[in-house]
Structure formats: C-alpha cells, structure tokens
Image (cartoon, rainbow, N blue to C red):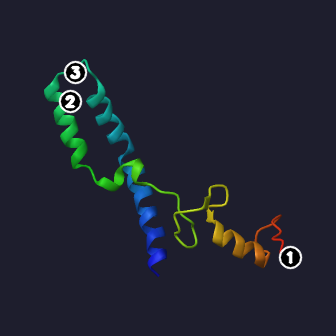
Amino acid sequence: MAKKSMVEREKKRERLVQKYAAKRAELNEIVHDQSRPMEERFKATLKLAELPRNSSATRLHNRCQLTGRPHAYYRKLKLSRIMLRELGSQGQIPGLVKSSW
C-alpha cells in the first residue's frame, strides 16, 4: 500500500506544479532580471520561498504508474522494468514477447 501512496503523492505534486507554474515563472523572471532594483528582486525571492516546495518542477520524479517504483522507468510505457517484464510475460503488452530459454 505504501507504494500506491507514492503514486498519489506524485500526482499531487504534478497538480501543484501546474497550479503554480505561472506564478513561479513570473517571480523567477523578476529575480533574474539584473535591471531591477535589488530590493524588488529580494522580495521576489522571499515570495518564491513562500510557495509550496512541491510546486517546484524539480521535485517531480518519473515513477511506475502501477508500483510507484522510481528506478528503471520506461517513459514510453510509464512502467518500471519489473512491471514491464511481468506484464510482458502475461501477454498484456501488445507487440512485446518475453523470450525464455
């Protein structure tokens, strides 16, 4: 069950990133604009720090949609190698043949 909650947590992060994307972009633009006064840039930095941590796109991580596993992830299928192998063995992935000898 813990792995399923990681999938839900990642979905929540994706929603937060979408929600705050425009606000973050606006504040980052102010922070990196050298022509603006230092006080204004500092205030923008503080406002950026007040936003939720999970609203940052760098917090997103590719995870298997079935197990929540973060490693050995196939982007095209959104599955980990373990689930790809298991579903391939069951014949649930069209065009995939798992050979065994």
For badge 2, the amino acid type reads Arg
Q: Which residue, given by chain and number where applicable, does mark 3 sit on? A: 36
For badge 1, the amino acid type reads Trp
Q: Position of residue 87 (x, y in %)?
A: 72, 74
**Spatial CA span between label 2 and label 3:** 7 Å
Q: Is residue 1 above or below residue 44?
A: below
Q: Position of residue 34 (x, y in %)?
A: 26, 20
Residue sticking out furthest to the left: 39
Q: Position of residue 9 (x, y in %)?
A: 41, 66
Q: Say whether marks 3 and 1 touch (CB < 8 Å).
A: no
Q: Say whether marks 2 and 3 touch (CB < 8 Å).
A: yes
User: Looking at the image, which is closer to me, 86 or 95?
Assistant: 86
Q: Which residue, given by chain and number where applicable, does mark 2 sit on? A: 41
For badge 3, the amino acid type reads Arg
- For discs 3 and 1, the disc positioned in front in the rendered view: 1
Residue 65: assigned label: none
Q: Secondary structure beneath disc 2?
A: helix
Assign the C terminus to one quadrant of the image.
bottom right
Q: Earlier in the sequence, mark 1 or mark 2?
A: 2
* Residue at point 77%, 76% (across, down): 89
Q: Which residue, given by chain and number where applicable, does mark 1 sit on? A: 101
Q: Position of residue 49 (x, y in %)?
A: 23, 46
* Residue at point 59%, 62% (across, down): 72
Among the 4 quarters of the image, the one containing residue 84 = bottom right
Q: Is residue 51 above or below residue 85?
A: above
How packed mark 1 is, by other alpha carbons closer than 10 Å (few <14, some 14-19, many 20 or more), is few
Q: Is residue 66 left or right of residue 94?
A: left
Q: Secondary structure beneath disc 3?
A: loop
Q: Is residue 71 left or right of residue 60?
A: right
* Residue at point 62%, 55% (across, down): 75
